[in-house]
Image (tube, grey):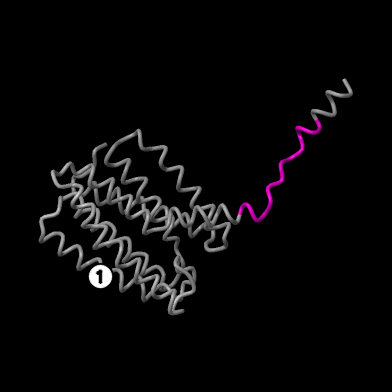
Amino acid sequence: METDKKLYQQSAEPIVIPEGWRDRSARIISNVFSPPLIALACIVVTAHAAKADSSLWWIFMFIALLIIPPTLYILSLVHSGAVSDFHLSRREERAKPLLVIFTYASLVFVVTYLLNAPRLMIIVTGIALIQILLVFLITLRWKISGHCTSAAGLSFLAIALYGEPMIPLTLIIPVVAWSRIRLGRHTLYQTIAGTFLGAVTVMGILYMTGSLSI
């Protein structure tokens, strides 16, 4: 009995996870689910749902036009010291890059429309434009989580296009939110606001354009 009691006491002791491990995990999550990579996933998900004959070509086209140039632009800002990091962690550093990216993405939207890109991909590009614009406007006064906006956008986009089997994908939202809070980049309310923005813009615009599959 004494041995069993000791074993119980040992098993009941909490497992202490080193602080450094949590921080490393948060950084990995933030990098893996960064807005550019989430945008890439959105392109693939949307192209597959569009079921166009040239879906693969459009995936490469949208990545080349919509993902790579803005990513290189932000990297150049980091390299020059204009911003502190790739994730634009400081609110005062966000406005100009967001405005530049919004302007560039607007041109891409027009170009892909003129090139007769699949309707669904154009709609999702429009959603991204609205999200960038809203994040920019909010950033002028307050800091909202772009990571959570993107994560919620991807999750609800997948649900809207593929239905209930995609609901578990929403689990990435609290994981991403935790990583941003853990790193001290956002507060809980800022991650909630980002999640709300991402979900509402996706579901609202897909509903208004008759693109929901659920």
Instruction: Judge whether 72 appears above or below 170 on screen.
Output: below
Residue 83 horizontal/vertical position (percent): 45, 75
Residue 80 horizontal/vertical position (percent): 43, 79
Residue 96: within the magenta?
no
Residue at 13%, 59% (x, y): give it. 113
Q: State which quarter of the image contains the C terminus.
A: top left
Category of crowding for the residue at label 1, using alpha-carbon neighbours closer than 10 angstroms: few (below 14), some (14–19), many (at least 20): some
Residue at 45%, 53% (x, y): give it. 32
Relative depth, front residue between 23 and 143: 23
Residue 12: within the magenta?
yes
| Residue at the spot of label 1 | 104
Instruction: Judge whether 7 appears above or below 145 on screen.
Output: above
From this viewpoint, which residue is outermost toward the right?
2
Q: How many marks?
A: 1
**Element class at badge 1:** helix
Residue 169 horizontal/vertical position (percent): 40, 41
Instruction: Judge whether 183 appears above or below 96 on screen.
Output: above
Residue at 39%, 58% (x, y): give it. 35
Relative depth, front residue between 85 and 198: 85
Relative side of 170 to 188, left or right: left
Residue 66 horizontal/vertical position (percent): 26, 62
Which range of residues does the magenta coloring cover?
9-22
Relative side of 192 to 211, left or right: right
Relative side of 113 to 202, left or right: left
Q: Amino acid at mark 1?
A: Tyr
Hey, which quadrant is residue 140 in on the image?
Answer: bottom left
